[in-house]
Structures are given as C-alpha cells and as structure tokens.
Image (cartoon, rainbow, N blue to C red):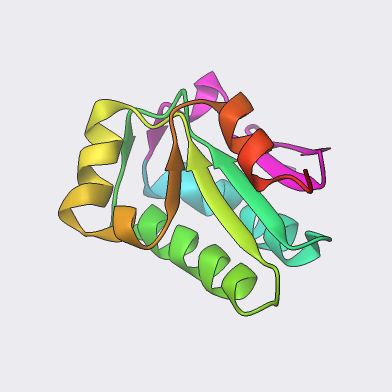
Amino acid sequence: MTEKSPTIEKQGGVTCIRLGPEFENLDEYTLDMIRTQLLEAAAAADPPRVLIDLQYTSFFGSSFIEVLFRIWNRINAIPGGKFGISGLTDYCKEVLEVTHLDKLWELYPTFEEAVRELSDG
C-alpha cells in the first residue's frame, strides 16, 4: 500500500503511534502517505489515549500540525481522553512553542515517560 508506515502499538492502555527513522522529514508527500493511517489509529483508540512519538522527526510543517490538531480534537472530545507527544527534537519543540501548542498538548521528553503518564496507572 505505502512504502512508509508508522508503527501502531498498544502499551498500558495507550495507543502509541511511532514515527521511525524513515519519517525524519514529514513533508507533504510523506504526510499524504500516512495521514489516513494516523487519523484512523486515533479514531480506533480504546481507551481514548493516544501518544505520538516523534523522536526521529527533525522537520514538520503546518500540515502535520493540522493532523495533530485533528487527532487531539477527536481524543479531547471523549471523556477521559488523553493525548501526548514524545521525543520532540529541539526544532520541532520550538515550532510547537512558537504556535503555543505546547500549552494545549502534553509534551514528554521520552516515549517511556509518556506511556507511564498517559496509561491507566
């Protein structure tokens, strides 16, 4: 289907969407290949806890921010819904800070810490 796919797994009641090294640059072409997978994984999350792991991503733009916002909006509308992002590079974290989305979304330095915080525990 697509040559690149995110890894989607469940850990501690959290749907983890991990973007590996092949997603270093989330340009329009790459995002077009995975947008539907990301949105469907978030829609299927039960319980409604979603973590996006971006430890390998060095660049994303406004189109990816829009996808993140759509995921967050869907999860946030469900009672008990939780959404987080882990492993941001300095550049990607700065993009979220400049847009003040770091105030809206939970950001975690590591994948493990994010799973622990978002899980049932």
For the magenta stretch, what is the residue range?
1-26
Residue 17 in view, yes or no: yes
Q: What is the quadrant of residue 79 in the picture?
A: bottom right
Horizontal and vertical percent for residue 21? 52, 19
Residue 19 in view, yes or no: no
Residue at x 65%, y 46% (from the top left corner)? 118
Is residue 19 within the magenta segment? yes
In front of the other: 119 or 53: 119
For residue 28, side relative to residue 117 (left or right): left
Q: Residue furthest left?
A: 98
Residue at x 25%, y 28% (from the top left corner)? 90
Is residue 73 within the magenta segment? no
Q: Tell me the quadrant of the picture where the C terminus can be found.
A: top right
In front of the other: 52 or 39: 52
For residue 53, side relative to residue 27 (left or right): right
Horizontal and vertical percent for residue 77? 61, 80
In the displayed structure, would residue 10 be above or below residue 111? below
Q: Residue furthest top?
A: 21
